[in-house]
Image (cartoon, rainbow, N blue to C red):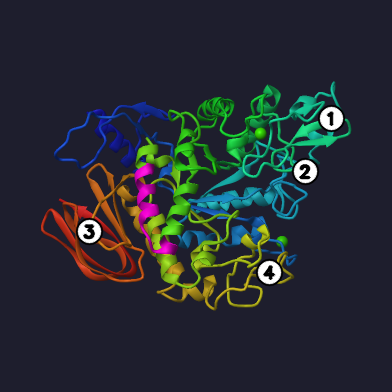
Amino acid sequence: MRAGACGLVLAFCATLGCKTSAPDVAEVMPAPIPAPAPEVAPAPAPVLVPALNEWWRDAVGYEIFVRSFQDTDGNGIGDLKGIAQRLDHLVSLNVDLVWLMPIHPSPSYHGYDVVDYRDVNPDYGTLADLDALVAAARERGIRIIIDLLLNHSSDRHPWFLESRKGPGNPKYDWYSWRDTAPSGWSRPWDGAPVWHQLGERFYYGLFWGGMPDINIANPAVQAEMEDIMDFWVKRGLAGFRIDAIRYLMETPDGQNADTLETHAYLKGLRKRIDAKLPGTLLLGEAWTNAEDQAVYAGEGDELHLAFSFDMASSIVETARDGVRSRLNQMLDRSAEAFKDRGFEAPFLTNHDMARVAREMMKDPLKLRVAAAIMLASPGTPFLYYGEEIGMVGGAAREDENKRTPMHWDATPKGGFTTGEPWWPMSDEAKGSDVATQSADAGSLLALYRRLVPVRKQNLALRRGDQKRIDQKGGKGVVSFVRTAGDERVLVVANVDKLAVPAFQIVVPGKPEVLASEGLDMPPTSDGTNLTIALGPRSFAWIKLTN
Ligand SMILES: [Ca+2]
Ligand SMILES: [Ca+2]
């Protein structure tokens, strides 16, 4: 068997669960790029072949802010039992990977400043509640990952309370201390100071003084964090979303983003995880451009997956503004940047951004086109809770307004709680709730429920590469082909407000429409050219067969 075909068999077997003796960890195997380029014959480039246990490559993810998802005891705070009650909603979306934002005890509402890495925030429930949720989710084929805060803790964490006692304390080197605030250090995105005075000394905290950076360079700290990861994986969690991954390690002279030290640390962590906890997902928040995001793949030996912030904003801006250039450039840059397209985790917006529906309020069609492009993208796509019903969230700028309670039904408290919600319910358009949209075949929720299974059923949409196709459509037409072995799917969208009369795309094959909205004529083909006409803000996923 040629090496290239072998990769495809592995991919199929991963899907079908065949028994093989393939290795547990990812490995690099040479294989030709499966690109349909008849006239040129470039030298085969090595591509990374996914290992069998890389289950996330076929998954669709869903991000949950526990505090805002479902309250079960009337205290106005979402809890783990609430998520267990709502698993059927996730099943209805064909979601099989859930990312829970921080679940640990924390003094803040958001939980990104942890005080105990081995427990559950009492606001959310108990370890037993988590165990029950993990088990109930597994029964439905859903894996759960949690936020892991390697970069910083709360300043109220017992480690820091010990550390601040000064030199000589066993935990002193668990954080970074200096006698004077060194010059040349600042927060990369706004220049804010990062050394905070405490008594006569200064400690390093990138985000703010209440979240001191953990000294992850310290082997004792690394061992502790690995033990914490063991703890959660043994409880059935499937992996970790590692927060602020770009800022893990600093250099002595004040470089604090994307350092070589961070990459070296991640290589060690990955090696250890693949050896001792195989199948455990390491997903990074590398909030940066595609090129720098791609570096976190290493040579297939750092993170398994990283969120695609650049792609996310490209899709959102393109769908919002109706101009294709941003996304076209992104498609070309991504094809260049990522050796392994499965490294990407596309999404629209997350808990740190104004919701995508707020961006596109005036035209729900924009939301539908954005969803169709995102769900046809390479990698592991993620939805942010409420996105599937077009929630806009709160209007004011506070972060809480990006994380408001879920609207399950049309009642004033949205079915979220019987008590007083921890944060006011957002003011949503009529019909922006799960119950109403479940009864409406034309709803955004119905579209998500339709598209995700199509992705799941087509290897090219899950694991294929992605190549932009030039065509003569209008200024708002974006098109690309996803290819995995012999399977090809053409994705075409018109983000413009005007319809596009019939035009041709040079893609061979007989077209079969897998999913579409707003087509003005069904696609036809003369064998080489596909002819299609698109309505305003429309899209189609078209399978091409020989
Ligand atoms: Ca509660
Ligand atoms: Ca750090």
Residue 414: quadrant of the picture: bottom right
- Mark sitting earlier along the chain (1/2): 1
Which x, y percent locates residue 150?
65, 36
Which residue is under mark 2? 210
Instruction: Tell whether 115 sits left or right of 262.
Output: right
Label 4 CB, ligand 1: below 8 Å? Answer: yes
Would residue 431 appear left or right of 102 to someone viewing this image? left
Report whether residue 449 is seen: no
Does residue 249 appear anywhere in the picture? Answer: yes
Specify start and end residues of the magenta stretch as a single range: 319-334
Q: Which residue is mark 1?
A: 201
How crowded pointer 1 is (Cα within 10 Å; few <14, some 14-19, many 20+) is rated as: some
The residue identified by callout 3 is 472
Secondary structure of the residue carrying tag 1 is strand
Q: CA distance from mark 3 to mark 1?
A: 64 Å
Q: Nearer the viewer, residue 400 or 434?
A: 400
- Disc 2 crowd, CA 10 A, few/some/many (<14, 14-19, 20+): some
Q: Secondary structure at mark 2?
A: loop
Q: Counting residues from the N terminus, which is met first, the one under dot 2 or under dot 4?
A: 2
Q: Earlier in the sequence, mark 3 or mark 1?
A: 1
The residue depicted at 51 percent of the width and 52 percent of the height is 139
Q: Residue at x 31, y 29 (%)?
A: 46
Please report the residue visible at 83 percent of the width from the left and 36 percent of the height from the top: 197
| Disc assigned to residue 498 | none
Does residue 306 lie above or below 260 as drawn? below
For image coordinates 44% across by 53% down, the residue present is 314
Could you tell me what secondary structure mostly forms the magenta stretch? helix
Real-space Cα separation, disc 1 to disc 2, in angstroms: 16 Å
Amino acid at the residue labelled 1: Arg
Q: CA distance from mark 3 to mark 4?
A: 52 Å
Tell me which amino acid carries mark 3: Lys
Comparing labels 1 and 4, the label whose residue is closer to the camera: 1
